[in-house]
Amino acid sequence: MIQQKEISLPEFQRGFHLITDLVARALPELPEQGLVHILIKHTSAGIALNENADPSVRIDFESFLNKLIPENHPVYTHTYEGSDDMPAHLKASLLGSELTIPVTRGRLNLGTWQGIYLGEFRNYGGSRRLVLTVFS
């Protein structure tokens, strides 16, 4: 059986944000065993699994990606949507646009220190849409 739901996240400022609870609350009742697939429907934001306890990890992610992929780099030709746009596309491609998480005993089977991250790479990205698909 497959269930699917599309949700809107609230607008987040640029950076990395834990959205595990937002996703978990939006999911339908989960099966005993299965999979949850999450797709972010945007090209300037991404999702990932990583450290969910220490907020400095999220700050370091943002700092490192900004150093790796700076704004206003002279090689960019896609610049008409703002100095943060092309870097946002590159960062989103590196981070990724989808996750698949196992479901065990009716719960997301994440590691103790794992959380779902939203990487918001635009200064004013707005609300982001996720497609949540549950496979049982």
Image (spheres, rainbow, N blue to C red):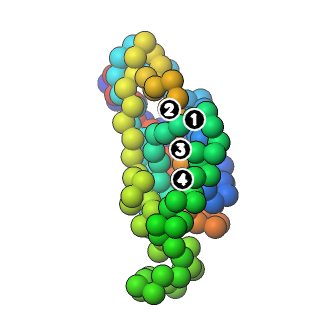
* Image: 17 above or below 28: below
**Residues under numbered marks 4 and 3 in contact, where contact means CB atoms less than 8 Å apart:** yes
- Which label sits on residue 114? 2
Q: Which mark is residue 117?
A: 3
Q: Secondary structure at mark 2?
A: strand
Is 120 situated left or right of 90 in this image? right
| Cα gap from disc 4 to disc 1, whole angstroms | 13 Å
As drawn, the label of residue 61 is 4
Which kind of residue does numbered mark 1 sit on?
Asn
Q: Percent from the top left, x then y, of residue 13?
A: 67, 58
| Label 1 vs 3, first from the N-terminus | 1
In the rendered structure, which disc, 4 or 3, sits on the residue that comes first in sequence?
Answer: 4
Label 3 packing within 10 angstroms: few (<14), some (14-19), many (20+): many
Q: Which mark is residue 52?
A: 1
First in sequence: mark 1 vs mark 2: 1
Viewer-side label of 4, 2? 4
Q: Which quadrant does the N terminus fall into?
A: top left
Q: CA distance from mark 4 to mark 3?
A: 11 Å
Amino acid bearing label 3: Tyr
The answer to which of marks 4 and 1 sits earlier in the sequence is 1
Q: From mark 1 to mark 3, how far is it between C-alphas?
A: 8 Å
124 with respect to 1 (left or right): right
Q: Amino acid at mark 2?
A: Gln
In the image, residue 54 lies at what x, y percent?
A: 63, 37
Q: Image height check: is 105 above or below 47?
A: above
**Lower position in the chain sequence, tag 4 or tag 2:** 4
- Which numbered marker is on residue 64? none
SS for callout 1: loop
Task: Give whichever of 66, 89 is nearer the camera.
Answer: 66
The x, y position of residue 111, in whole percent, is 46, 25
Please state which of residues 57 and 10 is positioned toward the viewer in this rendering: 57
Query: Residue at left 39%, top 52%?
Result: 96
